[in-house]
Amino acid sequence: MKNLLLLIPFVLVIACSKSNEKLSYISNEESGLDSAKLDSLDSFLESAGSSSLMIMVDGKIDHEYGDVTKRHTVHSIRKSLINSLYGIAVEEGLIDTSATLEELGIDDINKLTRQEKQATIADLLKSRSGVYHASGAVSEEMLLNMPKRGQYAPGEHFYYNNWDFNVLGYILEQATNKSVYQLFEEKIALPIGMQDYDGKFTEIDGEDPKAEIPETDGFYQKESSKSKYPAYHFRLSSRDMARYGQLYLQNGNWNGNQIVPEEWIEVSTTPYSITNRGYGIAYGMLWYVLYPNENRSTKSYYHTGNGVHMLGVYPSSNMVLIHSVDTENNYSFHKGHFYQMISMVFDSFK
């Protein structure tokens, strides 16, 4: 992928004010969902400790559970959120995905090698940079699977790499001279009428065990002993995340305005790295992809957060699925509950 700017028609949308458009509703009869099974789903969510869930069909709310207005830290879903900002920046000519780390002047605390500096922005978007430097907001599970420095060349191997994701935030901010939170408000939240996101952000010391999650729309998590580049966390309500998912389901178009380039969404949800062949799961660019196989004829895509949050886009069902858990406090919902929730949602279709 050389320069995606060549693939995308130029359309620039400038948002001047927040839309007051409210999401509308559709009945279970119209959508084809079974109301009795949805009642069982709600009972399960309550017992498991879910915070909220939303199912949108045909662009309308079919079912909701819990407080869909409450903001939560969405963890790794942050990656799919900046996917849109990259698509817009590429379209505007601010970012060339073929640019290398060396050309961008990217380095870190423990110096990058010449080979590592040949990784491109496209490699980072696919999480195939080959840079295995320490980074912030990394889980124990991620560390267990982390290759050794220099083990793979750029573009050669997929590893779900927070260094790549964190550096992408830095590159975007350098190219636009704005924070990711300001960009998200201007380019996404305002144009699609998000109701609970105002772009307020702060920072925390991720190495301080007493650091608390702030009541803002986002926060940088700095871990200065590991890397120069902080993680950027978003806090979103389920109803705002549902709008974001619907934007992608509509191929980046909102009320006739092309917010995110359609070609960018297609390129981003192309399966570049097979992560689970048995279930037909791959990684695209900041999205997981359920690719067509012997069990399904169409593609869908999603991202999870901390194994319990869900942002799912299912074009064949014309559905968006959102699930949130209050991970900022003690919670009981776990990955087993998560997979059961997914199964119950799809079982609700008559």
Image (cartoon, rainbow, N blue to C red):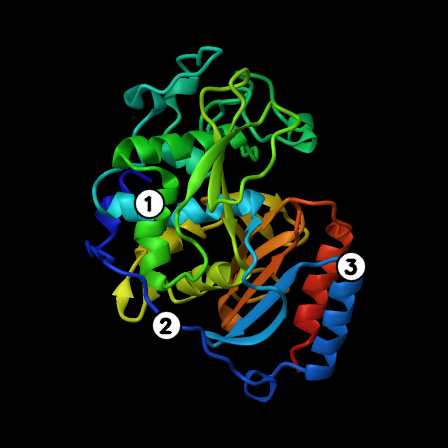
Residue type beneath disc 3: Ala
Residue type beneath disc 2: Glu
Image position of 320 with respect to 202: above or below: below
> Dot 1, crowdedness within 10 Å: few (<14), some or many (≥20)?
some
> Dot 3, crowdedness within 10 Å: few (<14), some or many (≥20)?
some
Lateral position of residue 171 relative to residue 196, left or right? left
Q: Sequence order check: which comes first, mark 2 or mark 3?
A: 2
Q: Residue at x 78, y 50 (%)?
A: 332
Q: Quadrant of the N terminus?
A: top left
Lateral position of residue 15 relative to residue 35, left or right? left
Residue 345 image offset from top left, x and y in percent: 67, 69
Image position of 232 with respect to 87: above or below: above
Most distant residue in the bottom direction: 29
Residue nearer the viewer, 274 or 175: 175
Residue type beneath disc 1: Leu
Disc 3 designates what residue?
48
Q: Which circle marks residue 21 in the picture?
A: 2
